[in-house]
Amino acid sequence: MIRIVKKGTLSVCRYLDVLLFLAWLAALCGLLLTGKDTAFLHPRFRLFLAGGTVLLTAFILVILFGPKRHNTGWPLAMTTGQALVIMAPLLFLATAVNQGMGSHTLTRKFTGTEQNTLTRLLESGNGTIGEANPTPAMSLLDIARKMKQIDGRRVITEGLVYRPDIMPENYLTLFRFAIFCCAADAMPVWVFVENAGVAAFADENWIRVDGTVRIVNFNGTDVPVIRADTIVKKPAPPPGEQYLFF
């Protein structure tokens, strides 16, 4: 009787592992097929994520058809504990995949040196950006990179709103996050927007701004200010499309 119970416990452990890794495989395949991996990872690293799914598939096959394990002691308790640890990131992924980084992240990552840091990164060859587009549509990354060249020029750009209490009445901060590798290294890219109607927009609203770039000195650093002619609220894009990659 004891031998039968032990054999049944080992079978439960074996298939618990398989179900756990199948859940991870489904999550990774779902990210790749829907493009939601870009909510966390630069698209250039998608190949590594695809490679991980292949290795995980091979691992599942080994568990199913490879040599059987001979556990002793309390295998079910041990396996359940391991499963809970491995499941924790998966549960986080399920809740975080549809949430982008907003003003709460900006306040934690903002140092005031991001624009200069991005310029050094781009100029050092770790990333590239094309010459200023003759059309007025530009990303915040383009504006931060080329702000002195486009001083006095009309631009159209978009991003998230942030209006802290210290912000002057007719100003808001327009920001997005730039990613070189993954969400962990995301840096805020921002400009100030000047317009009499900025109070109509709440924090983390997505807006499209059409106006003229001016360079001003802010705490000893040159920063771009867009004197907006029009500001239009727009729907938030999917999390994977909210970031700027360089």
Image (cartoon, rainbow, N blue to C red):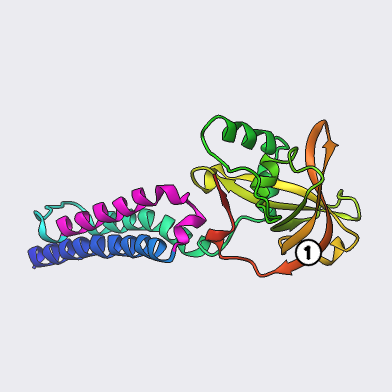
Residue 221 to residue 138: above or below: above
- The residue nearer to you, when weighing 220 against 213, is 213
- Looking at the image, which residue is at 31% across and 51% down? 52
Question: Which quarter of the figure has residue 80?
Answer: bottom left
Per the rendered image, the range of residues in magenta is 35-63
Return the x and y of residue 40 as percentages of the image width and height: 49, 53
Is 225 located above or below residue 27 in the figure?
above
User: Residue, x 65% and y 52% (percent of image)?
Assistant: 139
Callout 1 amino acid: Ala
Tell me: 138 left or right of 71: right
Which residue is the site of mark 1? 202
Instruction: List the single residue furthest toward the front.
Output: 134
Residue 103 lies in quadrant = bottom right
Q: Is residue 179 magenta?
A: no
Residue 27: name its quadrant.
Answer: bottom left
Tell me what residue is drawn at x 30 percent, y 62 percent. Answer: 20
Residue 129: x and y, percent? 57, 42
Q: Left or right: 63 with respect to 208?
A: left
Q: Quadrant of the C terminus?
A: top right
